[in-house]
Image: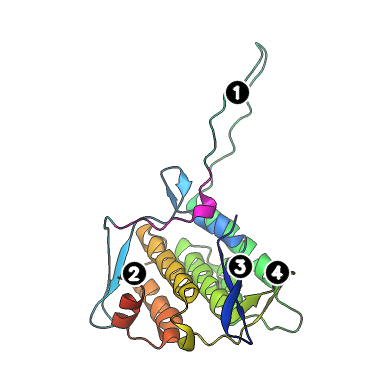
Amino acid sequence: SVVKTPTRDNNSKTYITMRTINLPLIAAFASVVKTNGYTQPQQCRTSFTSSATKFRVSQSQSTPFAISSFRQNHASSRLQMSDFGSAMPEKPKLTTEQKLIDAADKFINDFSAKLSEGVPPPPELDALIEARKTSNDKQSLSKGIYELMIEQGMLYDIDPTTGMLSPTLFDIKANLDVPEVKSEFDYLYKYGMSLISNELIEVDVVKNIVVKRLIERTGLSPEEFDKWLGY
């Protein structure tokens, strides 16, 4: 399953059809973040205060940010065995680092395969490949995946027929009143917050990513960005 958001029409500069924003990455990456038996970034209230250097995360009673595509309620079933039957052993549970390695590999392969002919890869793809080769720690992999996830959403359109990625001409600053634009930013913003809540990325790292890769693209101040998203 993947999370779907509208794609952009480069001519009319409006969102027109549904597209997948994060490809198979989400299923693998989000599996690291588990709550109550299903995949879901945890409840999180994040706010930029009077300056971009102040960044706080606190738990609240706000509606949890659910990735509905990943809520899979599996009905329990009983294993029927004969007197001589035996249950198959459970698969070994993966560590957080192993899950992130798997997510990074899948994202790298999928992103690379879906770049349209002649479209150069973004530097964030190379950075994730390098992190995968050299470090493999949860901080580096989570940072690399999150940055590439944002850049995919900000820089590329996905062909609704072929699924291939091509550079977008969409003017974000001129279309902040489009609900789907706000929804995409809100998703990426909250996903970063869930990574903090689950101790996959440090607060200052996410703060810098959000400021540089999300807030600055809107042309808003941190305070205006919070207000725009309804915080």
- Is 72 in front, or is 180? 180
Query: Which residue is depicted at the point 48% across and 65% down?
Result: 142
Q: Position of residue 189 (x, y in %)?
A: 41, 70
Query: Residue 21 in magenta?
Result: no
Q: Is residue 113 above or below residue 8?
A: above
The reply, left or right, for residue 211 in relation to residue 112 is: left
Q: Nearer the viewer, mark 4 or mark 3?
A: 3
Give the CA distance from mark 2 to mark 3.
32 Å
The reply, left or right, for residue 167 in relation to residue 221 is: right
Q: Which residues are magenta?
A: 62-72
Q: Nearer the viewer, mark 2 or mark 1?
A: 1
Please tell me which of labels 2 and 4 falls first in the chain. Answer: 4
Q: Callout 1 environment at 10 Å: few (<14), some (14 to 19), or many (20+)?
A: few
**Color scheme of the displayed model:** rainbow
Q: Nearer the viewer, mark 4 or mark 1?
A: 4
Q: Which mark is residue 198?
A: none
Give the CA distance from mark 4 to mark 3.
11 Å
- The residue where tag 3 is placed is 18
Does the rendering let one see residue 101? no
Q: Position of residue 71 (x, y in %)?
A: 50, 48
Q: Callout 2 environment at 10 Å: few (<14), some (14 to 19), or many (20+)?
A: some
Q: Which mark is residue 79?
A: 1
Label tally = 4
Q: Callout 3 environment at 10 Å: few (<14), some (14 to 19), or many (20+)?
A: some
Q: Nearer the viewer, mark 3 or mark 1?
A: 3
Task: Please tell me whether mark 4 sits on a helix, a strand or a loop.
Answer: loop
Give the CA distance from mark 4 to mark 1.
40 Å
The amino acid on which the numbered mark 3 sits, given as a three-letter code, is Met
